Amino acid sequence: MKITDEVRISDNGFIFNSKTGDSFNVNPTGLELTKLIAQGYDFDTIKNIFLQKYDLDDLTFEKDFYEFCALIKYHQITSQENPLDFK
């Protein structure tokens, strides 16, 4: 999964997709997750970062991660070669 070339991410959580003209605001956690995806980190690395930094379990992280990824994919923030591969 990668952030599409048309998407710009500001440091205050504002995400703009120039292809669609849509803009979004994400909270600090969403911003951190989006930036890690943009930097090319894989699922396991992102998971380890979040599990070390925040007080949550594997199942909670995975549920929230997949929900967030589905949302940003729906809004054309990301693209995936294999739509079932979130890694």
Image (tube, helix red, strand yellow):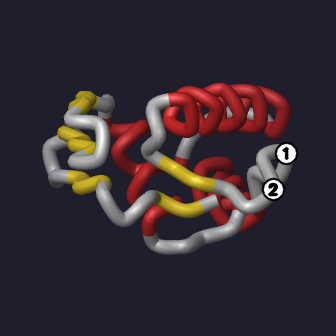
Q: Judge whether 61 appears above or below 67 on screen.
A: below
Q: Look at the numbered disc 1 and give the secondary structure of its residue.
A: loop
Q: CA distance from mark 2 to mark 1?
A: 5 Å
Q: Which label is found at residue 82?
A: 2
Q: Judge whether 79 appears above or below 26 on screen.
A: below
Q: Is residue 63 left or right of residue 4?
A: right
Residue type, label 1 = Leu
- Residue at image coords 58%, 54%: 79
- Residue at image coords 60%, 50%: 50
Residue type, label 2 = Asn
Residue 48, how many percent across, how many down? 70, 60
Q: Which label is found at residue 43?
A: none
Q: Judge whether 44 appears above or below 56 on screen.
A: below
Name the image quarter holding the C terminus: bottom right
Q: How packed is label 2: few (under 14 Cα within 10 Å), some, or many (20 or more)?
A: few
- Residue at image coords 55%, 62%: 2
Q: Are marks 2 and 1 in contact (CB under 8 Å)?
A: yes
- Residue at image coords 69%, 67%: 42
Image quarter of residue 57: top right
Q: Look at the numbered disc 2 and give the secondary structure of its residue.
A: loop
Q: Which label is found at residue 84?
A: 1
Residue projecting furthest to the front: 19
